[in-house]
């Protein structure tokens, strides 16, 4: 991704939630603009370990607590990172694909496989979609990329936060959805591929391959108009968790995310900064799909760990995975009710 411009130094803001007025935060003079794109990948061996510490968070007294096993999610991150760099077309990338699929046995899975031609050559791109049917007519997509950067393939760049954390998050969400009747929209989990730019710094024409292809495919087959919300996860494992308020995202969906965070008592981790993010949600936004990006784009001071060999698992926290995982599931509940 490419930082476009930075207008002011980071500044955290408190925001008050008022149901009867605008739910949007009031931002002060500190505003950041970035253009981002991120990576993700997944690797590893199947490990369906029993939940060691079920992470239950009450949404409200009358609601069923939202379950999310943070220690298991962190174990998935470790296993994905353990495969090493996972750029498109590589041996490690194939291992991650197999790892993800091994966790989706018994679930309806759609594959979206194609090839692209980039400056460096021709590459396979493989999107993986796991479908959990609901009773309402419509679909909520939760997405994460699982590849790492091709230009960083030889420097042991493993993208623990950028790619692995969000891919692991989706695997744990799959555990929570599996085998349960959904009284709401269908939920589709999307591990998308070829997100990272094939050149550094960011090069728009050779990035976001997976989502661009899938958005067009779903446009052509009529799926796109059924999508009620596209929720993207990217770089969500940072122990110092501060999810951005992305001004490119659909405003009502950002509102619901903040409401979900507030319902769970996690609002201090959300929307302290405002920025415009270019990421995997962009092609869906362009097609008119409501979409939002859950991303913490301040990974180490001044984002120094991003796209470097310092993006390693020691910077992450299971608590951050639990916060984003439960807020995502609470957001799904709010979209169901909308
Ligand atoms: Zn990235």
Image (spheres, helix red, strand yellow):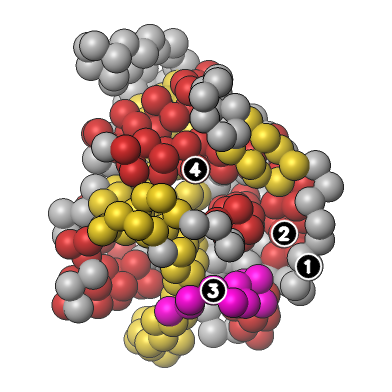
Q: Confirm whether the magenta stretch covers residue 103.
A: yes
Asked if the stretch drawn in magenta spans residue 71, the answer is no
Q: Are marks 3 and 1 in contact (CB under 8 Å)?
A: no
Mark toward the start of the polypeptide (1 vs 4): 1
Q: Residue at x 54, y 68 (%)?
A: 147
* Left or right side of 41 for 245: left
> Which sits in the foreground, 60 or 295?
60
Indicate the quadrant where residue 216 lies. Answer: bottom left
Q: Nearer the viewer, residue 136 or 280?
A: 136
Name the quarter where the C terminus is drawn. top left
Question: What residue is shown with label 2?
Answer: 76
Where residue 85 appears, x then y in whole percent?
66, 70
Q: Which residue was labeled with disc 1?
A: 47
- Tell me: 208 left or right of 177: left
Question: Marks 3/2: CA distance?
Answer: 19 Å
Q: Identify the residue at image location x=23%, y=16%.
A: 22
Where are the magenta residues, as a range?
Answer: 100-110
Answer yes or no: disc 3 within 8 Å of ligand 1: no
Q: Which mark is residue 107?
A: 3
Please provide percent x and percent y for residue 55: 71, 38
| In the displayed structure image, the side of residue 139 where residue 264 appears, left or right | right
Dots 1 and 2: beta carbons under 8 Å? yes
Q: Earlier in the sequence, mark 1 or mark 2?
A: 1
**Labels 2, 4: front one:** 4
**Residue 336's disc number:** none
CA–CA distance in space, label 4 to label 3: 19 Å
Q: Which residue is mark 4?
A: 329
- Where 133 falls versus 22 (above or below)? below
Query: What is the C-alpha distance between the residues marked 3 and 1?
Result: 17 Å
């Amino acid at each position: 991704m490419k930082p476009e411009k930075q207008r002011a130094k980071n500044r955290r803001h408190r925001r008050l939630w008022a149901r009867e007025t605008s739910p949007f935060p009031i931002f002060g003079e500190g505003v950041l603009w970035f253009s981002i794109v991120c990576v993700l990948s997944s690797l590893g061996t199947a490990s369906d370990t029993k939940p060691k510490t079920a992470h239950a968070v009450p949404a409200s007294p009358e609601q069923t607590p939202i379950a999310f096993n943070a220690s298991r999610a962190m174990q998935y991150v470790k296993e994905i990172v353990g495969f090493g760099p996972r750029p498109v077309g590589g041996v490690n990338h194939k291992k991650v694909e197999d790892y993800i699929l091994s966790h989706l046995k018994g679930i309806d899975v759609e594959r979206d496989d194609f090839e692209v031609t980039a400056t460096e050559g021709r590459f396979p791109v493989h999107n993986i979609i796991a479908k959990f049917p609901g009773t309402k007519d419509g679909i909520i997509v939760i997405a994460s990329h699982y590849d790492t950067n091709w230009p960083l393939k030889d420097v042991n760049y493993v993208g623990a936060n950028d790619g692995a954390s969000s891919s692991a998050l989706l695997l744990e969400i799959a555990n929570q959805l599996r085998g349960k009747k959904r009284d709401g929209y269908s939920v589709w989990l999307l591990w998308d591929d070829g997100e990272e730019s094939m050149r550094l710094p960011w090069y728009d024409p050779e990035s976001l391959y997976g989502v661009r292809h899938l958005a067009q495919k779903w446009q052509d087959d009529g799926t796109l108009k059924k999508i009620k919300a596209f929720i993207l996860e990217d770089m969500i494992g940072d122990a110092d968790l501060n999810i951005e308020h992305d001004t490119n995202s659909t405003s009502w969906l950002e509102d619901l995310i903040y409401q979900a965070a507030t319902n769970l008592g996690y609002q201090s981790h959300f929307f302290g900064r405002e920025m415009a993010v270019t990421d995997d949600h962009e092609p869906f936004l362009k097609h008119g799909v409501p979409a939002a990006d859950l991303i913490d784009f301040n990974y180490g001071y001044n984002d120094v760990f991003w796209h470097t060999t310092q993006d390693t698992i020691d910077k992450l926290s299971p608590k951050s995975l639990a916060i984003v995982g439960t807020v995502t599931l609470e957001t799904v509940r709010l979209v169901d009710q909308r």
